[in-house]
Amino acid sequence: MSVVRADIRPTRRRPEPARRATVVEVERATVVEVDGATAVVGGRTVWSGVDATVAAGEFVAVLGPNGAGKSTLLKAVLGLIPVAGGAIRLLGRPPGQANHAVGYLPQRRSFDTSLRVRGVDVVRLGLDGDRWGIPLPGRRSRAAAARVRELVELVGAGRYADRPIGQLSGGEQQRLLIAQALARRPELLLLDEPLDSLDLPNQAAVAALLSRICRAEGVAAVIVAHDVNPILPYLDRVIYLGHGGAASGTPAQVINSGTLTRLYGTPVEVLSTSDGRLVVVGQPEAPAHHGGRHDRHAA
């Protein structure tokens, strides 16, 4: 996978102030910065020495075997779990002080098939779910309704958003939950295993949607994932947590034999199949390949 980066250099033929303005336009602001961070949960060091950055508009996956602390990293960014060492900054502030700028989608919620709440109502909860009562008619209510419809169209859910959420497929529900997380125009989306209950085609479809949202809205998105293959073409960067440390960079920089061997302290080989999928051969339970645990789930 190749990543194209703009390299704009000032020339002497153009006025210097105009060139400086152009350079500022292509720079991406840092949304999340993890600097040598260590997490300890229940007296056990989950990960240590983690260095990573997430910039505005980037689509990033957190990968690693079970128990490596992928969800813990998201909770540490939110300030729900304090770091035992190093530092984490969210929009330049300590964790917990900028959560108003975060859309957070925790691990998969299941909806009972008898639930009559409509998809649009679930999206609306992202706007006013912290207020009691029925929204009163007026300019504010009309603006909220317009925002909900805008989000429904953004995630491509217009055909089914007015149906009960419990009657929708897993992929349809997940699109509406992403719309809910976007309701207050966050600068960062944190999604904990949003693809876990979806089949492979729907994993790729949701990944494509998130990538498009990152580009169109300038939102940074960080997701926890088990299998990188369905989402690999859409990722800008990965953060790989292993029992021997952590690595961050483009997929090509991180998901390779040398880096994973270093992380796990045992020989690991990364192979690329003819269709571009990655297969990790060696000791770790690798997110580049799994045993098809999603195959039985409906779309």
Image (cartoon, rainbow, N blue to C red):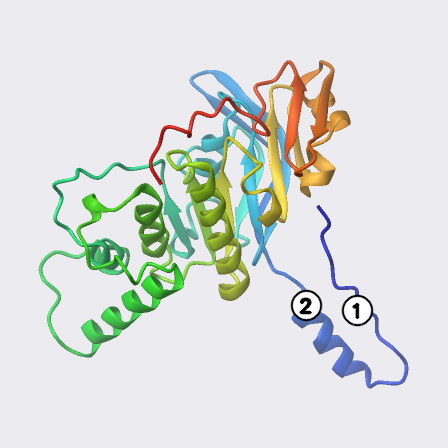
- Residue at 46%, 16% in the rendered image: 43
Residue nearest the observer in this picture, 14 or 99: 14
Mark on residue 8? 1
Q: Amino acid at mark 1?
A: Ile
Whether residue 53 is visible, yes or no, is no
- Residue at 36%, 35% in the rendered image: 107
Is residue 192 placed above or below 207 in the rendered structure? above
Task: Please indicate whether residue 94 sits to the left or right of residue 235 in the image.
Answer: left
**Residue 49 coordinates in the image, percent (x, y):** 64, 29
Cα gap from disc 2 to disc 1, whole angstroms: 9 Å
Mark on residue 26? 2
**Residue 38 coordinates in the image, percent (x, y):** 57, 28
Is residue 45 placed above or below 140 in the rendered structure? above
Pointer 2 and pointer 1: residues touching (CB < 8 Å)?
A: yes
Residue nearest the observer in this picture, 111 or 20: 111
| Quarter assignment of residue 87 | top right
**Residue 82 coordinates in the image, percent (x, y):** 46, 33
Quarter of the picture containing the C terminus is top left
Q: Amino acid at mark 2?
A: Val
- Label 2 neighbourhood size at 10 Å, few (<14), some (14-19), many (20+)? few
Task: Please indicate whether residue 237 sits to the left or right of residue 163 in the image.
Answer: right
- Label 1 neighbourhood size at 10 Å, few (<14), some (14-19), many (20+)? few
- Residue at 42%, 58% in the rendered image: 186
Name which of mark 2 and mark 1 comes first in the sequence.
1
Whether residue 285 is visible, yes or no, is yes
Is residue 240 placed above or below 171 in the rendered structure? above
Mark on residue 107? none
Kind of element beneath mark 1: loop
**Residue 57 coordinates in the image, percent (x, y):** 56, 58
Kind of element beneath mark 2: helix
